[in-house]
Image (spheres, grey):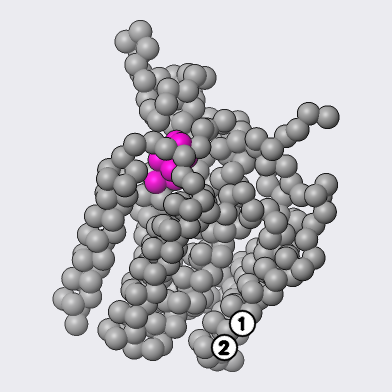
Amino acid sequence: MVKTDILFWIGFNVVVLVLLALDLFVFHRKSHVVKIKEALGWSAFWIALSLAFNVLIYYWKGSGPALEFLTAYLIEKSLSVDNLFVFILIFGYFKVEQQYQHKILFWGVLGALFFRAVFILVGVSLLNHFHFIIYILGAFLVFTGIKMATSGGQEDIDPEANPVIKFVSRYIPVTNRHFGSKFFVKIDKTVFATPLFLVLIMVETTDIVFAADSIPAILAISKDPFIVYTSNVFALLGLRALYFALAGIMQLFHYLHYGLSLILVFIGAKLMLSDYIHINMVIALGVVAFILATSVVLSLIFPKKEKDLPTLPGQETDK
């Protein structure tokens, strides 16, 4: 059984690396603007692949782990939608042209896969050795959910306050000029980092902050590192296509932010009460799906007035 698990881990990661290589070096070898039709097609592909893997989990591990995977995937995917707005602000701040945004998101996802694997393995190990941590994680999720709801979903982008950007700027020369899709250029025998490299750092560090919310939420659903890791991976693999599919309209789903905060509070409470009250995974999945569907429907029924919608980079008009 242990050998089978190891083979699944190796096989899964090999398949993911092959898919990423095909994505970057074959299907997106040339930088281009990703149109909505193309983005929707890729989104459908990644979602279908995720559901197919969910079926594999069902036949391999049973209905329980399959439900855990689906619930974890749905939560991670939903949190990703809320976080995409921050990526829009980052790209707008650095004036990244649309044809280069896919490359940034690709390498950002690759780095996120590594860091999240580390967080998941550490988190599962801590939960297995120190049971009381479930109460800390549960309280953290409840606190994060309340904070998310009261913040109103407003995000500030300040690269100068990012400690990693400060560190890079101190030790690596940075040019203000853009050089297409290059992260580094040589000018007068000196290697400079381009603004695109700073954007990559911003996206990567921002995702690490996001992981502080999403990983505890997924660990509240399953303590199986393979389920937690694979659900995260599939949600991240479809993140780029989802970004281009929703970039122009995601600000319309203004109640989604509050739905996600309610989900975090629910998952946190479920985790803290897990020793006393067992909530069936089918019920948990139903609650998460109901909250998400309700927040989207309410956003469509009660849309914000145009003057109240946030202004995205590139949408400014002259007064």
Residue at the extreme top: 188
> Do the numbered discs 2 and 1 sit on residues whose CB atoms are within 8 Å?
yes
Expressed as whole percent of the image width and height from the top left, the position of residue 202 reads 52, 39
Give the extent of the magenta segment.
99-106
For label 1, the residue is 287
Residue at the spot 34% in from the left edge and 88% down from the top edge: 62
Q: Secondary structure at mark 1?
A: helix
**Horizontal side of residue 272 vs 298, given as left or right:** left
Q: Quarter of the image containing the N terminus?
A: bottom left
What kind of residue is marked 1?
Answer: Val
Residue at the spot 29% in from the left edge and 59% down from the top edge: 16
Residue 268 lies in what quarter of the image?
bottom right
Q: Is residue 33 above or below residue 6?
A: above
Residue 46's label in the rendered image is none
Residue 108 covered by magenta stretch: no
Expressed as whole percent of the image width and height from the top left, the position of residue 246 reads 57, 54
Residue 283's label in the rendered image is 2
What kind of residue is marked 2?
Answer: Ile
**Is any part of residue 225 visible from this angle?**
no
Residue at the spot 69% in from the left edge and 75% down from the top edge: 294
Residue at the spot 41% in from the left edge and 50% down from the top edge: 109
Q: Is residue 184 above or below residue 293?
A: above
**Is any part of residue 20 visible from this angle?**
yes
Expressed as whole percent of the image width and height from the top left, the position of residue 238 reads 43, 58
Q: Is residue 15 above or below residue 20?
A: below
**Horizontal side of residue 21 vs 241, given as left or right:** left
Residue 9 lies in what quarter of the image?
bottom left
Query: Crowding near pointer 1: few (<14 within 10 Å), some, many (20+)?
Result: some
